[in-house]
Image (spheres, rainbow, N blue to C red):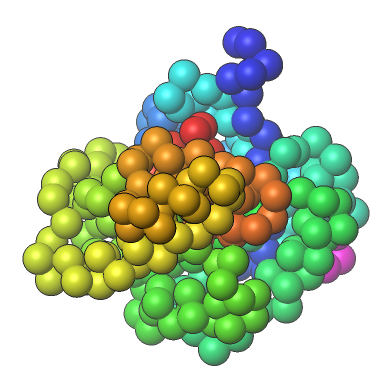
Amino acid sequence: METKNIRNIALLGHGNSGKTSLAESMLFVTGAIDRMGKVSDGNTVCDYDAEEISRQITISTAVAPVEYGGCKINVLDCPGYFDFVGDVLCALRAVECGMIVTSAKDTADSLPVGGQRSWNYLKNAKLPVMFCISKCNEEHGDYFKALETLKGKYGSIICPVTIPTSDGTGVIDLVHNVAYITKGNKAEKTAVPAADAGHVEDLRAELMEAAAGATEELMEKFFETMELSTEEIREGLRLGLKSGETIPVFCTAAKENVGVKRLMEFIVN
């Protein structure tokens, strides 16, 4: 595979935020494994060491290579506990981007300290940052409260790209303005549910404005028409991510494979 088709990304965040489960879901939905393991069962691909299985935590960084959309994505699943921060810093030497995984429940009021430290590690390494709000379907998990927490801490550069459907069965892709309802390891494309249409319209306007800020040409186009094409949004987000002026945010429920393919599509693009 050519170098231009390889993506290297590190998963960072507080312990028990869902990093290993997200990597496991990526492996499953791309067919790299034929059944999903669970951290609680001690049978995930990334947590294979006897101590990791016993303690149900990640101790050393593991690499989970997946292929999607004609690209190879090397996913580095990093430890979340501070005792093993050396492995996190080593992983950042080998990637082009970092994704901070934080659970919808734990981020409702404040970003866990592990997420804050991950932000500092990535900024010190001068690497682009993305957020993944995980476990969106769990009890007391609230994606939109978590999103407001991130906006309150980091400001208007926080930009949602996918959001959960109001019934919790899938995600809405704000870039393409469509929904994906997940069944097993497959996501069926459908129109945005009527119950979510108003909210989606407002968030898409924010998304286009964020993408438009990447270049003067996009900004002029947006102010003239108040609209950007899908390709223009994608290009604006790519440039904004690279410059640090835009921090994309995604939602997932990895154990049910919800939102995972949309996340990988963004990484590829």
Q: Position of residue 255 (x, y in %)?
A: 39, 55
Above or below, 11 against 167 in this view is above
Asked whether residue 18 appears in the rendered view, the answer is: no
Residue occupying the point 57% across, 48% down? 216
Residue 52, x across and y down, in percent: 70, 54
User: What is the x, y in percent for residue 137?
Assistant: 34, 69
The extreme left residue here reads: 194
197 left or right of 222 in image: left
Residue most toward the top?
1
Judged left or right of residue 216, residue 199 is left
Residue at (33, 57) in percent of width and height: 226
Quadrant where the image shows the N terminus: top right
Q: Residue at x 74, y 65 (%)?
A: 119
User: Is residue 238 positioned above or below 250 on the image?
Assistant: above
Quarter residue 114 falls in: bottom right
Q: Is the residue 56 above or below the residue 268 in the image? A: below
- How many marks on residues? 0
Tell me if 112 is positioned left or right of 29 in this view. right
Q: Main secondary structure of the magenta part?
A: helix
Question: Outermost residue, right direction?
Answer: 86
Q: Provide the residue span drawn in magenta.
A: 81-85
Residue 82 visible in the picture: yes
Q: Nearer the viewer, residue 258 or 194?
A: 194
Verify whether residue 191 appears in magenta.
Answer: no
Residue sitting at x 75%, y 64%:
118
